[in-house]
Image (spheres, grey):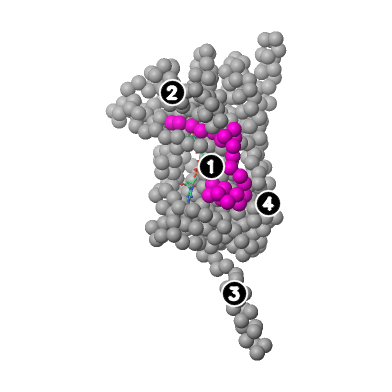
Amino acid sequence: MLMSTRVLLHTQLTVAIMQTDTDVIIIGAGPAGLTAARKLSEHAIDYLLLSRESTPGKDKPCGGYLPLRAFTDLQIRPFNGCHPVRAVRMKFSGREVVQVDFDKAAGYNVARDSLGGHLLKLIDNHSKHVQMKSLVTAISIGGDGCTVTVRDNEGVRDLHSELVIDCSGTTPVSIKTSLVRERLSPTAMGYANQFYYEREASQESFEPVNEFYYGPEFSPHGYAWIFPRGHVAVVGTGGLASEVRRSEKRLTDYLNHLVNDTEPARTELAGATLVRRDAGLMPLAGIVRPSYSERIMLAGDAAAHCSPITGEGIHYSAIAGRLAAETAIEAVEDQDFSKKRLRSYEQAWTRAIGSDLRWGLWLQKRLMHGGSSEIGGSLLASKKTTRVIAEMILGNRSVRSAILAVAPSYLKSKLLRH
Ligand SMILES: Cc1cc2nc3c(=O)[nH]c(=O)nc-3n(C[C@H](O)[C@H](O)[C@H](O)COP(=O)(O)OP(=O)(O)OC[C@H]3O[C@@H](n4cnc5c(N)ncnc54)[C@H](O)[C@@H]3O)c2cc1C
């Protein structure tokens, strides 16, 4: 009698403990998810990456600029499809265009499907662990594990893991059930439109220069850009979603003004064909916490790991993806997936990229308040400060060090004016 009660208890317990399909489920094959997968694969951790598109990066709206610093940090080399950026041009309204040249490439412009394909190739045994065309519709978390509901060509099914790393972009899957954080407000989210122009194969490539246009004629309190890559130039504009909504002009009106009425953009794009348009969101919120909870971490845009000042997030997202994976490795080794255990992830990304997010938001508020043209005009008055600004917007100088370097000149110009 005693014996059979034990057997029964044992059976009930085994039923109650969730059977996991894998240790870690990563959602999203952007830079954050793919970099997390690369790290887990190096440590032979059992994981599954699920992403909805057919190939990584396909159709992702993005300028595709990556600073040189990103290649060093992520231990990757420029690959086929990377187009060097050798100079930057900046235009503030009512002022002449200024150009800063660099001795070597300051960074690279790359199509997002090329970047996605390259990051995928760096993952050992990716065909076993990465499942594309897999839409995650829900995540639920209990004391004994995570349940991820996925719709793929086999239908709808539940997969179980010890841990989830949600890298599913600006509006992450986990937000539906507020597992970690709430939705960002339109004052903390950016929105941008892009036109893609292409030159004929018989024509020369676009010049390897990234351009930035500041002022109210180019965007609603944001900026416009041209990022060329060979025969393609990505022309975009955007601003905080709240400002885009409030603006009387549509973003496409700003783009048309840039392309048709503004030099040097007009001459550069003359004769090129508009081949594609897209639009997308980007978090411009600074440091957003929390980025983790029991059995789950958010990385990349999902955790607002994107520069509030430039809207560039590939580099930061990839760093955060790697750090989330490092914490996941330790959690799997210790079999501890508690909130307390995962706290080290938030500490790690705050150390690595928190300063740029914090100071970027600080600068964003100043530019919104003071007007980018007014501030920019006084900063571009000297060659030294112009170079500092160029290095910062190209992502090779920290925001804090740029602010410290230009502060004396900025204050001097303000005092002289009053
Ligand atoms: C117009 C525009 C221009 C930009 N230009 C630049 C630039 O030049 N340089 C730069 O550094 N940054 C730029 N950014 C920002 C950059 O694109 C992001 O910061 C970066 O892509 C974030 O990477 P991520 O991996 O966090 O998310 P993403 O790259 O957005 O990847 C999210 C992944 O999750 C998948 N996914 C989403 N939902 C689900 C679901 N339910 N189920 C399964 N999979 C799902 C998606 O398919 C995708 O694979 C730009 C953004 C925009 C909108």
Q: Whole-Å distance between the Cαs marked 2 and 3?
A: 62 Å
Going by the numbered disc 1, the residue's amino acid type is Thr
Q: Does the residue labelled 1 lie within 8 Å of ligand 1?
A: yes
Q: Whole-Å distance between the Cαs marked 3 and 4?
A: 30 Å
Label 1: which secondary element: loop
| Mark 1 or 4: the one toward you | 1
Which labelled disc corresponds to residue 299? none
Going from N to C along the chain, the mark reached first, 1 or 4, is 1
Which labelled disc corresponds to residue 14? 3
Q: Mark 4 points at which residue?
A: 343
Q: Whole-Å distance between the Cαs marked 3 and 1?
A: 38 Å
Query: Measured from the top left, where is residue 227 in percent x and y?
Result: 45, 29
- Residue visible at 49% across and 62% down in the picture: 158
Packing grade of label 4 (10 A; few <14, some 14-19, many >=20) is some
Q: Does the residue labelled 3 lie within 8 Å of ligand 1?
A: no
**Over which residues does the magenta segment extend?**
170-194
Query: Measured from the top left, where is residue 365 in percent x and y?
Result: 64, 27
Which labelled disc corresponds to residue 170? 1
Going from N to C along the chain, the mark reached first, 2 or 3, is 3
Packing grade of label 3 (10 A; few <14, some 14-19, many >=20) is few
Q: Quadrant of the N terminus?
A: bottom right
The reply to whether the C-beta atoms of the residues labelled 2 and 1 are less than 8 Å apart is: no
The reply to whether the C-beta atoms of the residues labelled 4 and 2 are less than 8 Å apart is: no
Going by the numbered disc 4, the residue's amino acid type is Arg
Going from N to C along the chain, the mark reached first, 3 or 1, is 3
| Mark 4 or 2: the one toward you | 2
Q: Quadrant of the C terminus?
A: top right
